[in-house]
Amino acid sequence: MFAAQKIKMKILRFYIIHRLAFIIALIVLGVAAHTLNNDPITAWICYILAAVSLTLYLMIGTMRIVQEAVAEGDVDSATKYMKKIKFPQLLFKPVRSGYYMLQSNLSLATNDLATAESNIRKSLTIKSTIVGDMEGTNLMQLGFIEIRKGNSKEARIHLLAAVKAGIPDKENLAAVYLQLCNMEAQRQQYKMAKIYFKKVKDLKPKTAEIVTQIKSFEKQIARMPG
């Protein structure tokens, strides 16, 4: 059963990558069925399948396999598949928001902060009630970009806004609280730093990097006044 599922996924991946070629082939077959074989039923089946494929091509693109590549840590494949999306402005709203967020993530991986910021701001402008509001996640990303740029004041504003908007993933929320804890410590707002640190620990994050940061920050927190 697992082998059959893998075969189905390979076929689906092949279809997604070569969807435009399938559309052209279906139209050609439809025209051939209509003109050469006088078979309007087969022709219309081909036209309908071509129309459905075109809709998927424009509104979803290759985002499914892009997300698979990102999940597997294959940045090169993710970038290659993203480039196959020629009209991102036509993507279905939640898909478009995810597209710009992934573009921002890929730009961050290459330290292209300007492009990363530009794309996450585009994602921020897209509102969708279908998959829930991604504003908190987008603001979190914008805050982390500002940290990389060295703009701690702007980063703090965006991270606070992200918490207020809501961050659904507890690991990301813990990362945000940890950054806010560090920022408050740097501002010598030790009471707030301790509050944020407690919030981090209460979330019980499992990400190795966050766990390591908690351990290294614990002694500093204990020495803080207030």
Image (spheres, rainbow, N blue to C red):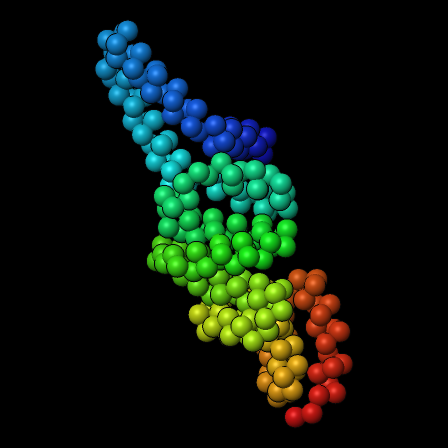
Is 82 placed left or right of 93 in the picture? right
Give the residue at the far front of this rendering: 114
Q: Where is residue 72 in the image (x, y as percent from the top left)?
A: 62, 44
Q: Where is residue 130 in the image (x, y as percent from the top left)?
A: 36, 54
For image coordinates 60% across by 79% down, the residue present is: 196
Q: Where is residue 184 in the image (x, y as percent from the top left)?
A: 61, 81
Residue 19, compared with residue 70, is above or below; it is above
Is 217 placed left or right of 80 in the picture? right
Q: Position of residue 58 (x, y in %)?
A: 38, 38
Is 42 placed left or right of 208 in the picture? left
Nearest the viewer among 185 and 226 is 185
Residue 151, compared with residue 73, is above or below; it is below
Give the residue at the far top of this rendering: 36
When asked about the image quadrant of residue 222, the answer is bottom right
For image coordinates 47% across by 32% down, the residue present is: 16
Residue 51, compared with residue 157, is above or below; it is above
Give the residue at the far bottom of this rendering: 226
Residue 90, compared with residue 205, is above or below; it is above
Q: Is residue 194 visible?
A: no
Nearest the viewer among 83 and 212 is 83
For image coordinates 65% across by 87% down, the residue present is: 188
